[in-house]
Each structure stands twice: as structure tokens, then as C-alpha cells.
Image (tube, rainbow, N blue to C red):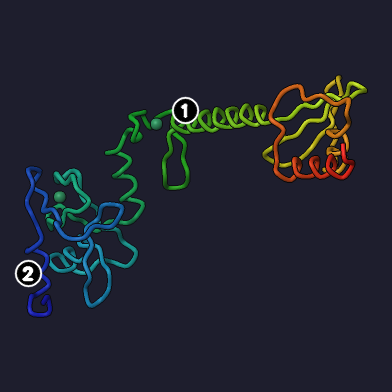
């Protein structure tokens, strides 16, 4: 259908003027918010197509800036008077001048500003994300603790099972511990003097092996 429509008509038929004076694209968008159109079976950004159509070729390696100073406020705008070809460095510098805060509203300045090449990051958000990760990890460790099985042996030692890693440890009263083979743990759990202190005896394989042992001895 578009073959009978010029590219100009195709663009204008899907443009709507908003209150900022932007000519907004009503067709497909990229997930980063740019207008998107197929030209000669090639996916292209609408503002770049519009620039070439109405203002001229884009110099090699140049970005098309949506010029904030001209009133442009939308990535999917293709109003030619809002578009300008600039070097990527200039584009970044302009954005930095306009975007002074992170998406959460912290100021990009002084100690709060982290530079990652051309990009800026917010230290407050970075710290909050780290803290969240640590809190999650603490929670996970507490949960693992709940799933431990402590078995006190006749000689006072404890067998401890960590459910997550499926690993067994012998934990001595002074806190020292060493890795234990599954067969050894079964042996100790089977010890008739052993007593489960807390935790849920867990792990199908472990329970199965203990049961097997009980059955084989015919107790
Ligand atoms: Zn605009
Ligand atoms: Zn922030």
C-alpha cells in the first residue's frame, strides 16, 4: 500500500502535533521510545528518515538531536525544525545540560555523579541498589539457616545440613566445621543416640538413605 504513497505522505499520515509543537509519531515505536518505520524493507528511526527527507543527508557518524532549546520534548517527534545533526559528543553534552537529575530525582552533581564513559550514573541510586542486594542476601542466609538440620550425636558433636548446597558439615562446639560425606552423615543420623535439635530432616536422598539403613538392619 505504501508503494503508492510517497515517503513524505507515509510520514505525515502518522504524525500528530502536540501542545509542545512536536510532531509525534503514531506508528510503531522502538522500546527506547523512538518512532520506527520500514523503508525499503529496512527498519529505520523516523526522526532520521524525516531529517534526510526535509533537511538533507546526515553526516557520517552524526546523531540527530531532538533539540530541547527549540522546544522539543519527545523522542518520537519528527518535526524538522526540532531536529539537528550533531556529533555524538555534542549530543551527550546537550543531554547532560538538560537532564540534571537521575530518574529518581537525585542531582547529577559533585560526589553523587558517577561517570561511566559518556554515561552518567547516580551514586545514591547505586548505593540503594547495593543495599537492596545485601538485604536480599541476608534474607536468603536466614532462610538457609531455617532449613538447616542440627543433629546432636552421642559424643556431643552436631551434624549440620545446608539444604541449598546439599552439603553436610560437622560443626564442633567451638564453631569449627568441616565438610562431611553424605554416607558419613547418614551413618551419624542413624546413630541411635543422635537427636534432632532443630530443623526439618530434609532432602529426599538423605531421608531415603536413612530409611534404607533402618530397613536393612530390621529394627
Ligand atoms: Zn519535537
Ligand atoms: Zn538517583
Measured as percent of width and height from the top left, residue 68 is found at 20, 44
> In the rendered image, which quarter is residue 79 located in?
bottom left
Q: Vertically, is 88 above or below 5?
A: above
Quadrant for the N terminus, please.
bottom left
Q: Secondary structure at mark 2?
A: helix
| CA separation in Å, label 2 and label 1 | 50 Å
Quick one: 31 or 198, which is closer to the camera? Answer: 198
Q: Is residue 196 left or right of residue 54?
A: right
Residue at the farthest front position: 218
Determine which of the numbered discs, if any, sits on residue 9 in the image.
2
Q: Is residue 134 left or right of residue 72?
A: right
Q: Secondary structure at mark 1?
A: helix
Residue depth check, mark 2 versus mark 1: number of the one nearer the observer: 2
Q: Within 8 Å: ligand 1 and the Cβ of disc 2?
A: no
Q: Vertically, is 9 above or below 108?
A: below
Residue name at image x 35 percent, y 34 percent: 102
Which badge, 2 or 1, comes first in the chain's sequence? Answer: 2
Q: Is residue 52 left or right of residue 32?
A: left
Q: Vertically, is 55 above or below 169?
A: below
Residue name at image x 78 percent, y 30 percent: 160
Residue at which label 1 appears: 111
How dense is the environment of label 1, judged by Cα within 10 Å: few (below 14), some, or many (20 and up)? Answer: few
Measured as percent of width and height from the top left, residue 58 is found at 25, 66
Measured as percent of width and height from the top left, residue 206 is found at 76, 42
Quick one: 177 or 73, which is closer to the camera? Answer: 177
Q: Vertically, is 139 above or below 97?
A: above
Q: Within 8 Å: ligand 2 and the Cβ of disc 1?
A: no
Quadrant for the C terminus, please.
top right
How dense is the environment of label 2, judged by Cα within 10 Å: few (below 14), some, or many (20 and up)? Answer: few
Amino acid at each position: 500500500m505504501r508503494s503508492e504513497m510517497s515517503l513524505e505522505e507515509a510520514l505525515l499520515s502518522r504524525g500528530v502535533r502536540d501542545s509542545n509543537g512536536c510532531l509525534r509519531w503514531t506508528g510503531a515505536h522502538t522500546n527506547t521510545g523512538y518512532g520506527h518505520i520500514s523503508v525499503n524493507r529496512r527498519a529505520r528511526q523516523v526522526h532520521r528518515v524525516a531529517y534526510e527527507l526535509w533537511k538533507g543527508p546526515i553526516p557520517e557518524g552524526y546523531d540527530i538531536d531532538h533539540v530541547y532549546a527549540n522546544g522539543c520534548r519527545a523522542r518520537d517527534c519528527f518535526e524538522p525544525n526540532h531536529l539537528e545533526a550533531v556529533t555524538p559528543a555534542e549530543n551527550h553534552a546537550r543531554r547532560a545540560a538538560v537532564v540534571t537529575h537521575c530518574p529518581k530525582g537525585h542531582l547529577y552533581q559533585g560526589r553523587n555523579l558517577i561517570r561511566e564513559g559518556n554515561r552518567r550514573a547516580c551514586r545514591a541510586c547505586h548505593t540503594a541498589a547495593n543495599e537492596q542486594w545485601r538485604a536480599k542476601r541476608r534474607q536468603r542466609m536466614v532462610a538457609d539457616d531455617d532449613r538447616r538440620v542440627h543433629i546432636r550425636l552421642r559424643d556431643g558433636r552436631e551434624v549440620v545440613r545446608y539444604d541449598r548446597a546439599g552439603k553436610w558439615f560437622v560443626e564442633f562446639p567451638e564453631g569449627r566445621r568441616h565438610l562431611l560425606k553424605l554416607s558419613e552423615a547418614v551413618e551419624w543420623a542413624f546413630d541411635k543416640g543422635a537427636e534432632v535439635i532443630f530443623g526439618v530432616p530434609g532432602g529426599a536422598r538423605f531421608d531415603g538413605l536413612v530409611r534404607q539403613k533402618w530397613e536393612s538392619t530390621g529394627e
